[in-house]
Image: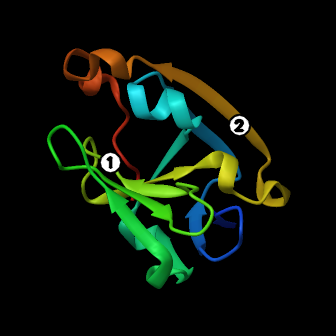
Amino acid sequence: MTTHRGGCHCGSVQFEIDAPAAIEASDCNCSICRMCGFLHLIVPRKNFRLLQGDDVLTAYTFNTGIAQHFFCKHCGIKSFYVPRSHPDAYSVNVHCLDSSTIESIAVTPFDGRNWEQNVSELSPIND
């Protein structure tokens, strides 16, 4: 496991995660992920540490209201969120991680437009 640092564009939100240096990410084509270019790395809550920015995060929910999409209220970047598919984890935007600790990124497409039919294809999180 490697400690990766990440955050939003303006630097107000900063976090660390413990994850492999060789990242396996998902590229979802649902309405919100496609529009914001989110590249998913799902990590258990115990492997996520918010270092700063709790006071500048604002949440957005839609549809079922289960997913909690957190945005920096200053720059608007969603660097992580609580996904509906893994409500006990965080989905971190790989694009928001410092690239210096990333060895490689393998990207798997995910058909989120048809989420209900495809959610069973998502990988479970590794503790």
The mark closer to the camera, 1 or 2, is: 1
**Residue with the mark numbered 2:** 105
x 55%, y 23%: residue:
108
Quarter of the image for the N terminus: give it: bottom right
**Tag 2: amino acid:** Ile
Identify which residue is drawn at 80% across, 47% down. 103
Q: Name the secondary structure under disc 2.
A: strand
Mark found first going from the N terminus, 1 or 2:
1
Q: Is residue 41 above or below residue 76?
A: above
- Residue 64 at what x, y percent from top left? 14, 41
| Residue 74 in picture, x, y percent from top left | 59, 69
The disc placed on residue 41 is none
Q: Is residue 7 above or below residue 21?
A: below
Q: Residue furthest right?
A: 100
Instruction: Find numbered disc 1 in the image and state the secondary structure of the residue it sits on.
Output: loop
Residue picked out by circle 1: 83
Q: Residue at x 58, y 56 (%)?
A: 77
**Residue 113 % position (x, y):** 34, 17
x and y percentages locating residue 10 in the rendered image = 71, 69
The one nearer the camera, 17 or 20, is 17
Amino acid on which the number 1 mark rests in the picture:
Pro
Question: In the picture provided, is 64 more to the left or to the right than 81?
Answer: left
To which quarter of the image does residue 2 belong? bottom right
Q: How many neighbours does mark 2 have within 10 angstroms: few (below 14), some (14-19), or many (20 or more)?
A: few
Would you place residue 73 above or below residue 40 in this image? below
